[in-house]
Amino acid sequence: MTALGRSLGLGRTTVHTAVRRSGPPPSKRTVVILARGLGLPVAELVELWRRATEGADPASVAGGAAGPGRPIGDWDPHDLEVHPAGTAPDSSPDAAPGGVVRRVLPGYVSREHDRVLARAVREAGNGHSRLVVLVGDSSTGKTRACWEAVQPLAALGWRLWHPFDPTRATEALDDLHRVLPRTVVWLNEAQHYFGDPVTGERIAAAVRSLLTVPERGPVLVLGTLWPKYALRYAALPAPDEPDVYSPVRALLEGRTLIVPEAFDAPALAAAVALAESGDRLLADALTRARTSGQLAQDLAGAPQLRDRYEQGSPAARALLRVAMDARRLGAGLHLPRAFLVDAAADYFSQGEYDQRADDWAEVAFAELARPVHGKQAPLRRAVPRPALRPPGDARPGEALAGPAGTVFRLADHLEQHGRAVRGDLCPPASFWHAAHTHLTRPNDLYRLAEAARACHRLQWHHHLCHRAAHAGHAGALFRLSRARREAGDHHGADSLLRRAADAGDVDALLDLAERRERAGDTAAAEVLLERAVESGRPYALLRAGGRRERAGDARGAAILFERAADAGDPDGLLLLARDRKLAGDLEGAEALYQRVTATGSPLALFQLVFIRGAAGDMEGAEALGQRAADAGHPHALLQLARVVEFEGDVERAEAICRRLVAIGSVPAMLDLADMRERAGDLAGAEELARRATRTGRPEALLYTARKRREAGSVQEAEAWARQAADAGGRDALLYLAELRTEAGDTPGAEALLRRAADAGHADKVKNLPAIAAKWRYGLDPDGTPTLPWH
């Protein structure tokens, strides 16, 4: 018997006390464990135990000196039915390495009901027994609120008892009379305790006795209920019906607390603050539930939704993958059933496809419609709201009528999960075929057409684009006009371009305006630009501002650039600042650049460095350059060092470079090597060059190539330059071409120039000799320094 007890997790003394003829009866937990281990009827033995202990002093029951339950701090909140929200690596000392995870909770946001609950907990801690039942829909945060509320009692040594085994109601009936003072009675999902017309009355009476007998307190009874149960217990029966819930109604009256379905604005703000301070789970949930405010539901349902995706039937997984791909590639929220079913064909393996039953789709949709916590379903039937707009107010590319037939909506969390796990995958042929066959909304068709183009499914791009254009999508018309022009059909391209412009496509309006201007029809070009400007798109405002500027209308250009900036595009402010700077208004330019720095623009910081330098404020320029370097953009500080050296302050230039070298800046190592060489410190220069070369960076390898050439070793220079080109250095291709030209290898030089042009250096290829000789020091081909204030 002792060996059996050890195998069941019971100590030798506990087993000995349980089986001896005299002494106090064992605890109920011991009876249940031994009955299960010996294969005896648990319910019968528990009933015998209850009769033996009923009316006895709790202290006379073995292990009962502390009553039922255990210290609050010994509980895991998930064992009290707080929904898991996510996992994290287990950092405990005894955790096995690799892959071990533990369930974690997000940070807690206190709401109005938490303040009321906290008051009841304080009163219990001060010696007054209390009962509070939180009422709210599924996964609104009721159980978590109870867990957070009892934490102050943990510090006071209180215990917590969660009646659960063998059933909630049975254990509550058996042990409520044994509850001792300073105990939290945890009645989560209280309908399991109060819902039965027979046992519910007895449990309600026992709880009332626990609360009203002074010597048994203080105790705190916490429960949770869904609204439908709270209404059922509170409803008065008809005159000819028995009042089965009378004791429960009397017990709960004035002791329920409503938990709202959504977080209000202050609670959302607090959640955002926690997310910004590093709470990953809250940050993730806010990406989906910030608008609805249903954070608790999202957090509770997310793990289950992922499980339903990963553990679902092959048919259910196929439908979910179709929906995930459709949403991540741009299809609307509401996906037609016919599209989902037909698209799923290629998402099955051959074996799965062969084994599909005739009703596979109905079974899979039923599987995916079953909700998880928070009343979320992986893929649920949806009923789109009608688009009610004034007559004649249809938007370009948007059909007023939704898709025909039954439509479904993917759960937000699974949509996001799909973007993460399927983001690099191209859908199979059945997806594109079903999209072309079943989707009707112009926006859906066009977005999927663009996705097909990005996936290099060019035939599907063409066909989907044609369907979108036929439905009136302006962007599709513009895209087709470009394709026609590339094919040499300028007449057809012009016709499609005009149709796209008439439909309000901004790109088409800008393109057509540019063509009208080149043809000399400035009046028509102005009208088209005005229509593009009316869209409020920043790039349209910038294009129109550029035209105003070319026409000499500086004030009109400035207004448009300012509007672009107000619309969220910092390029507008940068253009305004450029104009101020060119006009000599450095103070005005600086003010504008300061506004842009708030967006984190490294270019603005870069320009501010030189404005401060031009004003003679080298300390200020250096501070701004350091700020840019700290933000991950050391180029401004490096350029300042070059300018400072050019102005003659070599010591300061070297000091700036050394700060950058300390953080691993390879360009700074090379600049400092040049400075040391010019100062006569050849050993220091060589050491810096070697340090830079060891990084394998193309610019360092090319630097070494140049030095070898200066030393007269052309063969070594070419070897180093080839290493630089192999490491991805586009400038190395130009340098190699120059070396090949000098060696008389014209075909080799031309091949290298073509590679350089393909790599994006077509502009430099046009002026190779001058640029190859002088690009390193920021000089124009005639040798003039290209410094910002010269």
Image (tube, rainbow, N blue to C red):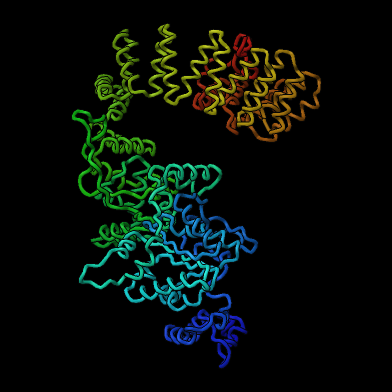
| x and y percentages locating residue 513 in the rendered image | 32, 15
| x and y percentages locating residue 2 in the rendered image | 60, 86
Q: Is residue 21 above or below residue 33?
A: below
* Left/right of residue 331 with respect to residue 643 in the rendered view: left
Q: Residue furthest top?
A: 552
In front: 597, or 198?
Answer: 198
* Left/right of residue 539 with respect to residue 343 in the rendered view: right
| x and y percentages locating residue 743 in the rendered image | 63, 20
Q: Quadrant of residue 497?
A: top left
For the N terminus, give its image quadrant.
bottom right
Give the residue drawn at x 34%, y 70%.
195
Residue 393 visible in the snapshot: yes
Q: Is residue 236 above or below residue 321?
A: below
Residue 418 visible in the snapshot: no
Q: Quadrant of residue 695?
A: top right
| x and y percentages locating residue 41 in the rendered image | 43, 86
Question: How many marks overall?
Answer: 0
For the C terminus, give its image quadrant.
top right
Give the residue drawn at x 31%, y 57%.
369
Give the residue drawn at x 70%, y 31%.
692
Q: Quadrant of residue 12?
A: bottom right
In front: 57, or 455?
Answer: 57
Q: Residue furthest bottom?
A: 21
Q: Is residue 369 above or below residue 179?
A: above
